[in-house]
């Protein structure tokens, strides 16, 4: 057995058999399929045969022409869970067995390998990347909306006609169509949060809305909502997690044009569950309609950035990401808007923590503006939040 190196490329025979064994405790919840496109560029899927729970086999892969990917995914991800808990994986092709390393991120769908042809030779690139929101996120990212994914919904029970689950933000529904009630434990969304004191995280109220279970950071530590200020779109979570809190800059005002960075976890189903940091400036000292509790900034953000940190050039927390201007609405009015985003001032975070009886430590304001150090401090304090019904 060989240790697989992600990115490693190996030649394989044109009709290579493929066998995958999963040794972890939740292997029975994982299915495997080969997914690619046919000559007309339509998505096509070939399911592996299930030998027994945790053991999947495909005899020859020549039937799926062109390039394709071998993907392992949680069958019943409506109830949460990740492929990580089924590792270690043993991946066998042409008699060679590779042991796949466990992903560093929590993934409900993982691409084990990409199979392609180069210079007339069939080759395979080992991979270990994937999607936190599972096989439906994979299908959306590959623009294969019409693909029927096998073995969906229940371990070992293929249910025909069970199409992709809509994205947690509601995409996939036509206008006027109701959103189905999520099942208990179902992943319904994600956001970001900021550690402002030991075991105390601030995020947006709309991030935790409708949630019953919250998983924080890569270790999926359990979080509990202790306070919500819906009017200012803030919420506090108590969570025993690692990291160093960010100091709040509340003694000196923001100034127009000030450089800032936004740190959070946007679109983790597409971009991955690692921290994203963007740069911009304070582009307005009030929010929509002159709201003095908010300010406008230009650092790009995306769905899932909500609740993330807005920091100054020294890494002090000056605000919490809240919202973006509705670009589609502006286009309908004949206007163009780009990177018009809003943050909630850090002073509101301080006031909310005090009202909730949560003591914030007297953290000294940082004066170190070396970018590498600033980002390292943000990486320690900004966390992802997975929200379950």
Image (cartoon, helix red, strand yellow):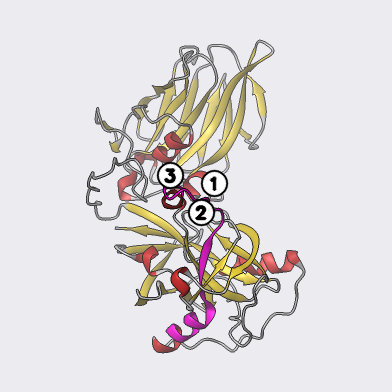
Residue 87 place in picture, x, y as percent? 48, 43
Q: Which mark is residue 271?
A: 1
Circles 2, 1 touching at the beta carbon (< 8 Å)? yes
Image quadrant assignment for residue 311: bottom right
Q: Residues within 10 Å of mark 1 (few under 14, many from 20)?
A: some
Q: Between marks 3 and 2, how big is the CA–CA gap? A: 21 Å
Q: Secondary structure at mark 3?
A: loop
The question of residue 346 being in magenta is answered with yes
The question of residue 389 being in magenta is answered with no
Residue 336 place in picture, x, y as percent? 52, 50
Residue 103 place in picture, x, y as percent? 55, 46
Image quadrant assignment for residue 185: bottom left
Q: Horizontally, is 282 left or right of 286 in the view?
A: right
Give the magenta-colored segment's residue range: 331-352
Q: Which residue is mark 2?
A: 302
Q: Which residue is mark 3?
A: 108
Residue at 59 percent across and 32 percent down: it is 98
């Amino acid at each position: 057995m060989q240790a697989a190196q992600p990115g490693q490329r190996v030649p394989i025979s044109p009709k290579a058999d493929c066998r995958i064994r999963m040794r972890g405790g939740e292997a029975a919840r994982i299915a495997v399929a080969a997914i690619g496109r046919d000559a007309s560029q339509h998505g096509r899927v070939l399911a592996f045969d299930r030998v027994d729970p945790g053991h999947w086999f495909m005899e020859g892969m020549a039937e799926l022409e062109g390039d394709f990917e071998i993907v392992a995914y949680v069958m019943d991800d409506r109830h949460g869970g990740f492929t990580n808990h089924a590792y270690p994986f043993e991946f066998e092709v042409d008699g060679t067995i590779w042991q796949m390393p466990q992903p560093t991120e929590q993934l409900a769908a993982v691409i084990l390998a990409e199979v392609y042809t180069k210079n007339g030779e069939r080759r395979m690139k080992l991979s270990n990347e994937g999607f936190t929101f599972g096989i439906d996120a994979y299908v959306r990212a590959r623009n294969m909306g019409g693909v029927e994914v096998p073995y969906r919904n229940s371990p070992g029970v293929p249910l025909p006609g069970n199409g992709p689950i809509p994205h947690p933000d509601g995409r996939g529904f036509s206008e006027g169509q109701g959103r189905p009630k999520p099942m208990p434990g179902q992943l319904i969304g994600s956001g970001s949060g900021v550690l402002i004191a030991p075991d105390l995280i601030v995020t947006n109220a709309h991030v935790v809305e409708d949630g019953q279970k919250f998983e924080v950071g890569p270790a999926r530590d359990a979080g509990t909502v202790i306070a919500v200020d819906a009017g200012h779109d803030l919420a506090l979570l108590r969570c025993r997690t690692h990291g160093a809190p960010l100091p709040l800059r509340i003694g000196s005002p923001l100034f127009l044009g000030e450089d800032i960075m936004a740190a959070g976890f946007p679109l983790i189903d597409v971009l991955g569950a690692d921290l994203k940091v963007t740069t911009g400036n304070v582009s307005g000292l009030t929010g929509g309609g002159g709201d003095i509790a908010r300010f406008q900034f230009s650092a790009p953000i995306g769905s899932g950035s909500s609740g993330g940190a807005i920091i100054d050039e020294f890494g002090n927390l000056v605000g919490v990401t809240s919202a973006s201007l509705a670009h589609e609405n502006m286009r309908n009015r004949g206007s163009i808007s780009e990177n018009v985003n809003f943050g909630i001032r850090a002073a509101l975070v301080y006031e909310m923590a005090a009202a909730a009886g949560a003591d914030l430590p007297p953290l000294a304001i940082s004066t170190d503006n070396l970018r590498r150090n600033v980002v390292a401090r943000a990486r320690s304090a900004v966390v992802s939040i997975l929200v379950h019904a």
